[in-house]
Image (cartoon, grey):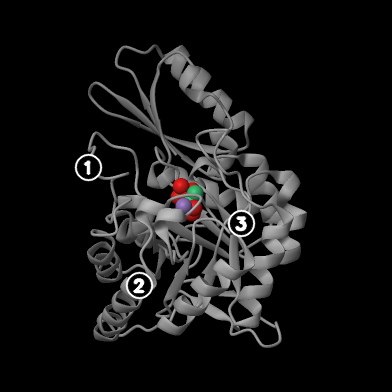
Amino acid sequence: MIIVIRPETTEAQIGHVLERIHELGLKPHVSKGETRTIIGVIGDESKLQAEPLQAIPGVEQVLPVMKPFKLASREMRKADTVVTVGANLSGVQPVKIGGGSLLMVAGPCAIEGEDILRTIATAVKAAGANLLRGGAFKPRTSPYAFQGMGEKGLEILRDVGHSLGMPVVTEVMDPRQVGIVEKYADMFQIGARNMQNFDLLKEVGQARKPVLLKRGMSATVKDLLMSAEYVLSEGNTDVVLCERGVRSFEESTRNMLDLSAVPNVKGQSHLPIIVDPSHATGRPDLIPSMAKAAIAAGADGVHIEVHSCPEKALSDGPQALLPPQFAALMADLRRFAELMGRSF
Ligand code: PEP
Ligand code: MN
């Protein structure tokens, strides 16, 4: 930690800052320049972070040296984390995410019924998707919009996915839903609207199934990593991040896809990160190029919504790819990934 002292601060005030540092059991190193004094502090930075040092008269700036996220940081772990979803389930092909293994999550926005889910799931599986998605609890802007099928939907998702040999991921919106979602799903999804639902993050942190954590629509990369830290600090080490676009002034796309988040996260963290061009763009005509760009940027996978009849979909129909569009994209992505030395 580096503490910058304001010019014209008295010796007594500097002495008080040093006293506070000593009280915390840390060692200050004072460096006096012509006009400024800087204090370097060696020791457990977390002790200082909890102190409102900035409130002491004479303190101009407090600069941390370590990243505020520890368990999620590259400093903590040099090698890429590889997350496995659906391990030890009979008849189900587990998926590895990270370290060169790519994830393709595909499926409808919401689970709407068994027959329709089976039609979509069979198509995405045949095209090469390795994780089936579908929401049973849907975060909708309007309370009058379709809210999801709840537990019945979870059961359908598991039965359809597992009968096709695919593990399944679904959104959990509330700490009270964690138990029931864990019973059926192989991976929890935390949606953009809940990225900073800290009680929910703690609850899935105590569960023992992997977590797909989506970036909040106005969250910084640091906010995203701090949210991952909540899950990791509770003991669940299997976290996969997801860039899904942030709010911007642009009106022709649903959100603005921040592809730089991929190498940005990779430089700072060992956790895998995937990209969701469906929610990022909201437009089927833009999804294929953004999916390819995601792989080129180093993403560990792609998340795409597919529906066999988008005009009848109960949520996010306009952004859904049709199964043949998804199959064509998947064929392109496979060749593309191979060029980059990675595979689905
Ligand atoms: C979804 O995956 O259907 C969803 C609601 O995504 P997001 O949380 O990114 O908006
Ligand atoms: Mn959706």
Q: Position of residue 163 (x, y in %)?
A: 65, 81
Give the alpha-carbon distance from disc 1 to disc 3, as whole Å.
37 Å
**Above/below status of 164 relative to 200:** below
- 145, 257: nearer the viewer: 145
- 124, 297: nearer the viewer: 124
Mark 2 nearby-residue class (10 Å; few <14, some 14–19, many ≥20): many
Q: Are marks 3 and 2 in contact (CB under 8 Å)?
A: no
Cβ of disc 1 within 8 Å of ligand 1? no
Residue 258 located left or right of residue 138: left
> What residue is shown with label 2?
326
Name the quarter where the N terminus is drawn: top left
Q: Position of residue 270 (x, y in %)?
A: 45, 65
Give the alpha-carbon distance from disc 3 to disc 2, as whole Å.
33 Å
Q: Quadrant of residue 237?
A: bottom right
Q: Are marks 1 and 3 in contact (CB under 8 Å)?
A: no
Dot 1 lies on which element? loop
Q: Position of residue 316 (x, y in %)?
A: 43, 50
Mark 3 nearby-residue class (10 Å; few <14, some 14–19, many ≥20): many
Residue 131 located left or right of residue 100: right
Q: Which label belongs to residue 252? A: 1
